[in-house]
Image (cartoon, rainbow, N blue to C red):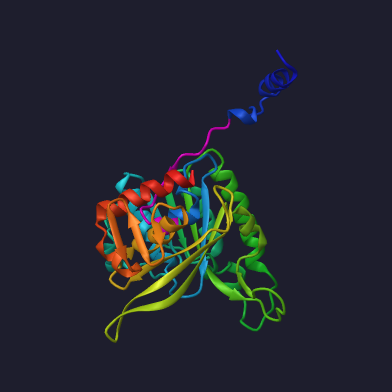
């Protein structure tokens, strides 16, 4: 028996959870079905001990909640238990129906204070497979609720969130729960260099996230003079479960449809699944002049093959 194995056995006997680094298994991942999201996540949502703790952050109406609901849909298809903490009191049952969520199989939690949300999180994490908090900064601490508006109270929310993160670490320790926190964009006043964009809630909760994805809107998609959709940009600025700093875009339509084709097209070019010669694009036997015509002519089965080839080449 070598020294490492001897130390390991002694510590296990003493009651500690020890193993060699080589014994750690690669986390399996669930693909959401939204290529843009799976791409920036690094292949999908990790199914691992300690859970995959994700933050969706960005400005208003940038698709954060809609993307989270699409993940609910995917988890429900896999017969996983899903819950939603409705902190903003804005859960839209009809919109969820459009996306394809089974509302009868989704638990909705209503809380009034940050402290109650923390307690609810700690209780629910061991019982569910997916838990969404919408949104973390909309929850108000009891101390703020009870004080007068003119009274000063410094960083109360951040201090309570620091306690909540410790509760979450304890609750999720051996569980494989996916927790998605939706967070709102704030602006750091007085910033002279770099981006002034920040999120609320304090530093402790940022450290807790395995993955942080920024959502931004791009140019509108129009049919004649009517706006029917918008480009969404996703940027992964932290990822401990995959490759960080990936960015991509996806077309989001106001009827709830998220179109994978554009993000698959650009990834296909990047990883040489789609060949380009001047203004001519080719995949298999399909060879077309012009980007828009090429995207339009491909069938669903072609896009499926393109996605499969992209994942093979990324690995």
Q: Quadrant of residue 190?
A: bottom right
Point out the stretch of residues depicted in magenta.
Answer: 24-37
Relative image position of residue 101 (x, y in whole percent): 29, 57
Relative image position of residue 185 (x, y in whole percent): 55, 72
Q: Which residue extends farthest right?
A: 3
Asked if 168 appears above or below 221 in the picture, the reply is: above
Relative image position of residue 126 (x, y in whole percent): 47, 43
Prevailing secondary structure class for the magenta stretch in the rendered image: loop
Q: Nearer the viewer, residue 111 or 64?
A: 64
Asked if 139 appears above or below 170 in the picture, the reply is: below
Q: Quadrant of residue 193?
A: bottom right
- Verify whether residue 36 appears in magenta: yes
Relative image position of residue 281 (x, y in whole percent): 35, 61
Left or right: residue 104 versus residue 234 is left
- Residue name at image x 38 percent, y 52 percent: 32
> Would residue 203 be visible to someone looking at this image?
yes
């Amino acid at each position: 028996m070598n020294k490492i194995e001897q130390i390991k056995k002694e510590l296990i006997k003493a009651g500690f959870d020890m193993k060699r680094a080589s014994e750690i298994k690669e986390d399996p991942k669930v693909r959401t079905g939204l290529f843009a999201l799976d791409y920036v996540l690094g292949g999908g949502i990790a199914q691992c001990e300690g859970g995959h703790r994700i933050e969706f952050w960005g400005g208003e109406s940038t698709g954060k909640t809609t993307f989270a609901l699409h993940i609910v849909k995917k988890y429900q298809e896999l017969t996983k238990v899903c819950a939603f903490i409705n902190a903003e009191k804005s859960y839209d049952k009809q919109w969820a129906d459009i996306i394809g969520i089974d509302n009868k199989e989704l638990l909705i939690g209503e809380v009034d204070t940050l402290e109650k949300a923390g307690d609810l999180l700690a209780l629910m994490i061991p019982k569910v497979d997916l838990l969404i908090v919408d949104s973390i900064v909309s929850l108000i601490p009891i101390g703020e609720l009870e004080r007068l508006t003119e009274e000063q109270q410094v960083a109360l929310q951040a201090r309570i969130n620091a306690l909540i993160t410790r509760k979450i670490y304890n609750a999720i320790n051996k569980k494989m729960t996916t927790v998605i926190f939706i967070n709102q964009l704030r602006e750091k006043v007085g910033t002279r260099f770099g981006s002034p964009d920040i999120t609320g809630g304090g530093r402790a909760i940022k450290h807790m996230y395995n993955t942080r994805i920024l959502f931004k809107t791009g140019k509108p998609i129009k049919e004649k003079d009517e706006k029917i959709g918008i480009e969404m940009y996703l940027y992964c600025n932290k990822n401990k479960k995959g490759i960080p700093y990936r960015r991509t875009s996806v077309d989001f339509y106001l009827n709830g449809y998220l179109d994978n084709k554009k993000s698959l097209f650009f990834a296909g070019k990047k990883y040489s699944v789609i060949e380009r010669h001047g203004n001519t694009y080719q995949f298999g036997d399909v060879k077309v002049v012009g980007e828009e015509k090429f995207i339009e002519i491909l069938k669903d089965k072609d896009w499926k093959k393109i996605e499969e080839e992209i994942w093979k080449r990324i690995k």
